[in-house]
Image (spheres, rainbow, N blue to C red):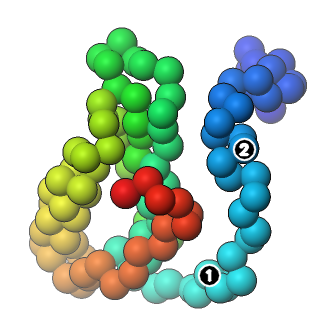
Amino acid sequence: MVNGIEEGSLKDRFCEHCEIGKSHRRPSKIPIRAVSALLECLHINVYGLIEKSILGNRYMMMITDQHSKMIWVFFAKDKKGFIEMFEAWLIAREHECAHRYNNERLQRIRLDRGREI
């Protein structure tokens, strides 16, 4: 439970198109393998076309590192900007891993089978 949010109050927050678009999908039959290093497997989800934010953003990309469970969220006005955002983010993370950890590099990306990017 989250303080200040009533149970079931978020149910109507998703637009009809988002619900219909993902309702026909079956769960993936490919099991999630265990990982032992940072950046070994990233999960990427892109959400949109959502209600325009104060800054005019209508899309959201969420990157989750399977090993560390860290989550990064990016916002954009259109989907075209996510590729450049991801490339810049990946260069920064690999550079950070080279200096702090065992020089881990990206090995796998797992998408939600969407056609967003």
Q: Amino acid at mark 1?
A: Ile
Q: From the viewer's perspective, is residue 101 above or below residue 25?
A: below
Q: Amino acid at mark 2?
A: Ile
In the picture, the disc for residue 20 is: 2
Residue 6 in the image: state x and y as whole percent.
Answer: 83, 19
> What residue appears at the point 46 percent right and 49 percent down from the top-left corner?
46
Name the mark nearer the viewer: 1 or 2. Answer: 2
> What residue appears at the point 65 percent right and 36 percent down from the top-left corner?
17
Does dot 1 land on a helix, a strand or a loop? loop
Lateral position of residue 80 relative to residue 44, left or right? left
Lateral position of residue 20 relative to residue 51, left or right? right
Q: Tell me the crowding category of disc 1: few under 14, some 14 to 19, or many 20 or more residues within 10 angstroms, Cα based.
A: few
The answer to which quarter of the image holds residue 96 is bottom left
Asked whether residue 60 is in view, the answer is yes
> What residue appears at the point 76 percent right and 19 percent down from the top-left corner?
5
Residue 4 in the image: state x and y as whole percent.
Answer: 74, 15
**Quarter that holds the N terminus:** top right
Q: Tell me the crowding category of disc 2: few under 14, some 14 to 19, or many 20 or more residues within 10 angstroms, Cα based.
A: few
Asked whether residue 71 is in view, the answer is no
